[in-house]
Image: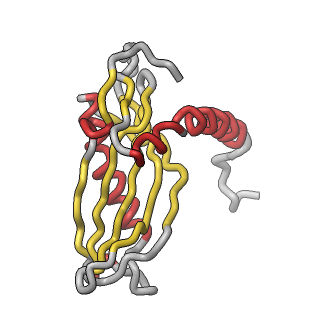
Amino acid sequence: MADSRASVSCNATLIMTTHRVFQPDLNEHQSVFGGKILSLVDDSASVAAVRLTHKTVVTASFDHVSFLQPFHLDDSMILTAYVTGTGTRSLEVFVKIVGENLTTGERFVGFTCFITYVIDDRSVTTPLPGITPVTAEQRYICSGYGHRHDQRAIRRQEQRDLNSHVTTDSPWTE
């Protein structure tokens, strides 16, 4: 996809945070609760989005969410996020969490997802800068942005169709 807009490297939006797993993070399976992971991911990944836009963004969607391996007590979770594609008001951020067993040093990819953020200001009409990947990982992930963008457009239409059939009627009145 040729792009005449100014470009910013993925690394200019890169954020990394590390979290140590403690007992209150765990569910009944003694692994980190999925909701805790999603909260950490959204909170941290929004920094990558704002680093590019310098504007207030809101979370529009999470997709391709994959809980690949569980994180356990005394693991660390190294969260990395960077922008992988842009439009006018929307942008995609890729997130991965690498787990590290702090006693053995073994590392593993435990989680990946894509998050779409939208600039909250509807008056924004200038396209965001394009994104230039730097690493082999970034080149691979950014190369799929167009396809994921098109998939999201289809899902938005499917969601609108679904929403037209969802009611707010109380189920107890019938």
Determine whether 121 is above or below 134 in the image.
above
Relative side of 62 to 25, left or right: right
The colour scheme is secondary structure
Residue 14 figure quarter: top left
- Name the foreground residue: 157 vs 54: 54
For image coordinates 36% across by 22% down, the residue present is: 128
For image coordinates 36% across by 29% down, the residue present is: 120
Res 3 visible: yes
Res 24 visible: no
Residue 159 figure quarter: top right
Determine whether 157 is above or below 82 in the image.
above
Determine whether 125 is above or below 30 in the image.
above
**x, y percent for residue 146:** 56, 32
Residue placed farthest to the front in the image? 136
**x, y percent for residue 170:** 66, 55
Relative side of 102 to 163, left or right: left
Marks counted in the figure total 0
**x, y percent for residue 133:** 37, 36
Residue 84 figure quarter: top left
For image coordinates 51% across by 57% down, the residue present is: 65
- Name the foreground residue: 2 vs 129: 2
For image coordinates 31% across by 44% down, the residue present is: 46
What is the quadrant of the C terminus in the image?
A: bottom right
- Name the foreground residue: 148 vs 55: 148
**x, y percent for residue 57:** 33, 35
